[in-house]
Amino acid sequence: MTRPQTWDWTESLTADPPSTAQQPPNWVAQEVFRPTEKGPDNGESGPEMSLAEFVAEARYESFAPEISDESESGEVELAEWELAGSPVQEEAFPSGLTLSPAVGATGEKEEHWDPYATKLPLWATGPAVRSHMLSPNFTVGELVTSGGKAADVARISPALVHCLQALRDRLGKPVTISSGYRSWARNVAVYRDRGSVPTRSRHCSGQAADISVAGMSGLDIAKAALDACGRDIGVGIGATFAHIDVRGKWERWPYASGDAAKRDIAAIDAHRRGLRTTPPTTDGSAYVPGGVPSGVSGSGAPSAGSLRAKIAQFAEQERARWSNGARVETESAMTATLQDYYRTGVGITVSASELQSSSWQGGHPWSAVFISWVMRQAGAGSAFAYSTAHREYVSAAKHNAEAGNTANPFWAYPVEKIVPEVGDLVCADRDGGGGCGGVTYATIDNGTAWSTHCDVVTSVDRVGRKLTAVGGNVSQSVKAKTIAIDAQGFVVPQQSGQTCRYFAILKVRDGTPSTSQQESGPAAPATVLDPDAAARAIRLNTSYAPALRWGEHLDAITRLTASPGSTPADATFANAVAQWQRGRGLTPDGVIGPDSWIEMVKVINR
């Protein structure tokens, strides 16, 4: 089975705002936005910043109203939005897909001219394939329809699809596309219908989409796109929609004018400045833990290569202290221990009478407090987001992974993406009293007060397909549990006899080799694909090489995978890729698709 992966590779666009005269009279700009601050523990929004304060802080930079021949005027975006009518928001289901190449007139200013020479191929996108899935939630038809008209021949940028899927995953609700691919011929026709000269459009290159999300303003969508796709995208901000384009550099523009336009630009610029700029990597580079913050006790920082081991060591130490569940939280003999968890872990003082009260304990779960204490003792220093709520540190680790923050060792991944090792955390949805909440990796950081639980992995048995994990406040104690893993080492999300699902792995990237990396060494058994899997890998690699442009780096890839002289059309190449994937904790299917390529390019480029 090919496991879904989270995409975080981005590109971008350039564009300018329309003049007031170009906007339909009923087009009202979004003028209200509400930046918030998270509360200390519960993740709820804090006091709103005034508009004047926010604009002053953002230091609005002027934008040129002129339209160049490389710009999006916004005129066609508005026209196509009107033609699209009321959005239909439908959920799609996962499906594999390989599109067939198509031919078309691609010369300068011909029907399918690519004004930016992206080299993206033309695909056959007629009625027979429009319902097929390009990603878990987007169909071919959605990406090739503009203003309600679908194209039988179209360009579709893989980077755009991944950006849109990442946005959809992050929001946890449908993203509606009103305009995707627009041929040059249609671009010219729409402009001329409005009495204007056509401008070069990224829609013609298959790199742009105009989108809406129920209940969100264009500004909110643009901010979410930056969060999901990274800092280097381009956005056009409408009242209830946003234009997202994947060109390779940052650009932004409003569809409003006057003060409303200035507010939108100030808001999106300020939001982008708050995002990290470090390029992503998972190369296992060493992390040197910081010291314990002043005011709290701790055991000091261990050496860089032992953070995972220290985390597991302290978890096991506490399991023994609690006799693996034999001691319980209200016992007076455990009061001092719990007080230390609270004081050292999250800086909270709790009285003995409170800790020995069953009613107080019932309203104050301390499992995240326990994890915070373990991290303090292990020497995580300021890198860990200590909290009484698991969702806070999982969200922080997710943001580290999405931003590629190599200065921080805590990165969170979907449970399907990464193999857990000793010292990592496995995180599950939790019954909050009314059944499982339904939290997912995509929604963990959306501000909802999710009920979750995480445990520390202390041993992994790949042969027995199980791991041992230790958690706090498990049956009012600290104890170990056994978690089933599959043959590749991935946690089985829905455990037998367990109501709520596992949704995330918090990986501790401290520079020490993982089991999967050790297994991929010279002495490791070779990964050999069966004939059907090898044939599939060859077919997909032959397609992905030009589509994702990794074929241009074939020499570097074959050196990395120890398969010199092989090509994407060789089974030897597919098997070598599968072996490399296995060592990275990825699904060893032999296919350098988008998710494997993003991991591979990090290693090649360093």
Image (cartoon, helix red, strand yellow):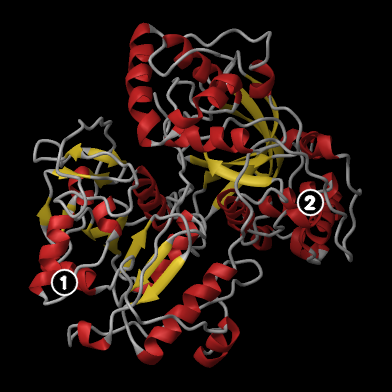
Q: How many C-alpha atoms fall within 10 Å of the one at disc 1: few (<14), some, or many (≥20)?
A: some
Q: Earlier in the sequence, mark 2 or mark 1?
A: 1
The quadrant the N terminus occupies is top left
Give the quarter of the image for residue 535. Answer: top left
Q: Is residue 559 above or below residue 53?
A: above
Say which amino acid is labelled 1. Ala
- Where residue 373 is drawn, which disc sits there? 2
Q: In the structure shown, which secondary structural element does the residue marked by tag 2 occupy?
A: helix
Front position in the image: 151 or 48: 151
Residue 471: x and y, percent?
68, 41
Q: Nearer the viewer, mark 2 or mark 1?
A: 1
Residue 456: x and y, percent?
69, 38
Q: Is residue 423 above or below residue 37?
A: above
Residue 51: x and y, percent?
50, 89
Is there any visible trace of residue 519 in the rendered image?
yes
Q: Is residue 322 above or below residue 238?
A: above
Give the quarter of the image for residue 504. Answer: top right
Give the residue displayed 84% in from the left and 53% down from the top: 290
Give the residue displayed 45% in from the left and 79% down from the top: 265
Q: CA distance from mark 2 to mark 1?
A: 57 Å
Residue 39: x and y, percent?
62, 72
Say which residue label 1 marks. Answer: 79
Horizontal side, residue 477 vs residue 129: left or right:
right
Front position in the image: 320 or 345: 345
Horizontal side, residue 298 vs residue 367: left or right:
right
Say which amino acid is labelled 2. Trp
Q: In the structure shown, which secondary structural element does the residue marked by tag 1 occupy?
A: helix
Report if the CB atoms under discs 2 and 1 are less than 8 Å apart.
no
Horizontal side, residue 176 vs residue 358: left or right:
left
The quadrant the C terminus occupies is top right
Q: How many C-alpha atoms fall within 10 Å of the one at disc 2: few (<14), some, or many (≥20)?
A: many
Front position in the image: 31 or 606: 606
